[in-house]
Image: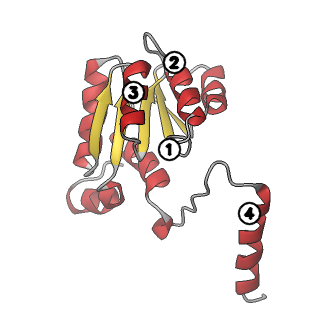
Amino acid sequence: MSLTGRFWREYVRYVESRYALVVDDDADSRELFTMFLEHAGAEVASARDGVDALAAAHARPPDIVVTDLAMPRMDGLELAHRLRAHPATRHVPIIAVTGHAVMDVPRRARLAGCDAVLVKPCDPDKLISTVRTFVGGRRHGVRRVRRDATVRQVERRSARADRRRPPR
């Protein structure tokens, strides 16, 4: 299903005023993902590899990172690992976009710290929907919990919510 006109504007409204970092060694893919996110209202910076992206992310931490996995100098897996290791970017959602959809790649991407994995060619609706999941907030039922939240904190929040909920 393709979203157009009024429906597209409603659909992407929750991406507005977000700062995204797009990382891809292929200029066409980088430009395409940048265009998708800018059309959705996000401010977008781009980098051609993991080294440039890491420098950009440390200079100004983004709200979300969209990265290719196969790049020269530093690949997307190493980039995700290093972003997770740095205090300023530890909680930034990372979406991996790859043309290598073999079974092991999504698992390796998640182990490196990626929050989602999309396969190229990436549908713009799927990309925006995934971005919105991570930066859209609570309005659509997305409850964001910080990555380093302890189990006890999550259990306490859940217990408080259960006490507020009337019994059935």
Q: Nearer the viewer, mark 3 or mark 2?
A: 3
Q: Earlier in the sequence, mark 1 or mark 2?
A: 1
Q: Position of residue 5 (x, y in %)?
A: 20, 57
Q: Amino acid at mark 4?
A: Gln
Q: Position of residue 138 (x, y in %)?
A: 50, 67
Are the residues tagged 4 and 1 within 8 Å (C-beta)?
A: no
Q: Work out whether 150 lies above or below 33.
A: below
Q: Earlier in the sequence, mark 3 or mark 1?
A: 3
Residue occupied by mark 1: 92
Are the residues tagged 3 and 1 within 8 Å (C-beta)?
A: no
Residue occupied by mark 3: 55
The span from disc 4 to disc 2 (Cα, nearest Å) is 37 Å
Please tell me which residue is depicted at 24% across the width and 44% down the height of the picture: 38
The span from disc 1 to disc 2 (Cα, nearest Å) is 24 Å
Disc 1 crowd, CA 10 A, few/some/many (<14, 14-19, 20+): many
Q: Which mark is residue 100?
A: 2
Q: Nearer the viewer, mark 1 or mark 2?
A: 1
Q: Amino acid at mark 3?
A: Ala
Question: Image quadrant for the C terminus?
Answer: bottom right
Horizontal relation, residue 130 to residue 42: left or right: right
Horizontal relation, residue 140 to residue 52: left or right: right
Of all residues shown, which one is farthest toward the top? 72
Are the residues tagged 3 and 2 within 8 Å (C-beta)?
A: no
The span from disc 3 to disc 2 (Cα, nearest Å) is 26 Å
